[in-house]
Image: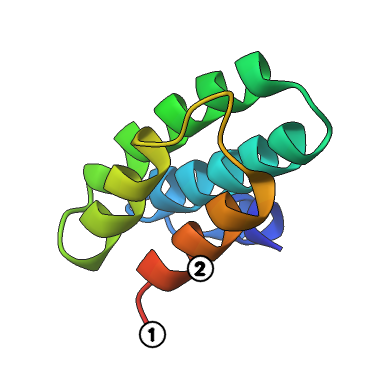
Amino acid sequence: MFEGRWKCAPDDERELWQGLAQICVGLTHLQRGNGRGAVTLFSRGAAKAQSYGGAYDAVGKAASGLTQDSDPAEAIALILASLPR
């Protein structure tokens, strides 16, 4: 979902959507046991989301606080709770 939005988003939104997509893919990696890959994507995605400030700063902070040992279900819940409504 986010990847499709990222690819067709206006230029000034593209990095936000790319960052959100990276965080989601990081969650998938975490679920599949690839903690190292997950942390790499959380870091990249968090930096992009936080650069938009405001409501997206919370998403970036949540993602950057996740580790390769984070519980996948708890990580997903944390990211969902931090997304702007």
Residue 68 in the image, given as x and y percentages of width and height: 57, 23
Amino acid type for the residue under numbered disc 2:
Leu
Looking at the image, which residue is at 67% across and 46% down?
Answer: 72
Amino acid type for the residue under numbered disc 1:
Arg
In-image side of 28 versus 67 (left or right): right
Quadrant in the picture for the C terminus: bottom left
Residue 67 in the image, given as x and y percentages of width and height: 49, 27
Q: Give the residue at the far bottom of this rendering.
A: 85
Q: Kindly indicate the quadrant of the structure image that contains residue 31.
A: top right
Residue 85 got which mark? 1
Foreground pick, 19 / 76: 76
Q: Give the residue at the far left of this rendering.
A: 54
Looking at the image, which residue is at 52% across and 43% down?
Answer: 18
Pointer 2 or 1: first along the chain: 2
Q: Kindly indicate the quadrant of the structure image that contains residue 38.
A: top right
Residue 63 got which mark? none
Looking at the image, which residue is at 50% across and 50% down?
Answer: 20
Q: In the displayed structure, would residue 30 be above or below residue 81?
A: above
Circle 1 packing at 10 Å, graded few (<14), some (14-19), many (20+), is few
Q: Secondary structure at mark 2?
A: helix
Q: How far is mark 2 from mark 1, CA to CA?
A: 10 Å
Query: Looking at the image, is mark 2 or mark 1 nearer the viewer?
Result: 2
Looking at the image, which residue is at 53% across and 19% down?
Answer: 40
Residue 54 in the image, given as x and y percentages of width and height: 15, 63
Q: How many marks?
A: 2
Q: Secondary structure at mark 1?
A: loop
In-image side of 5 versus 31 (left or right): left
In-image side of 6 versus 35 (left or right): left
Quadrant in the picture for the N terminus: bottom right
Foreground pick, 63 / 73: 73
Q: In the displayed structure, would residue 68 be above or below residue 73?
A: above
The residue indicated by pointer 2 is: 80
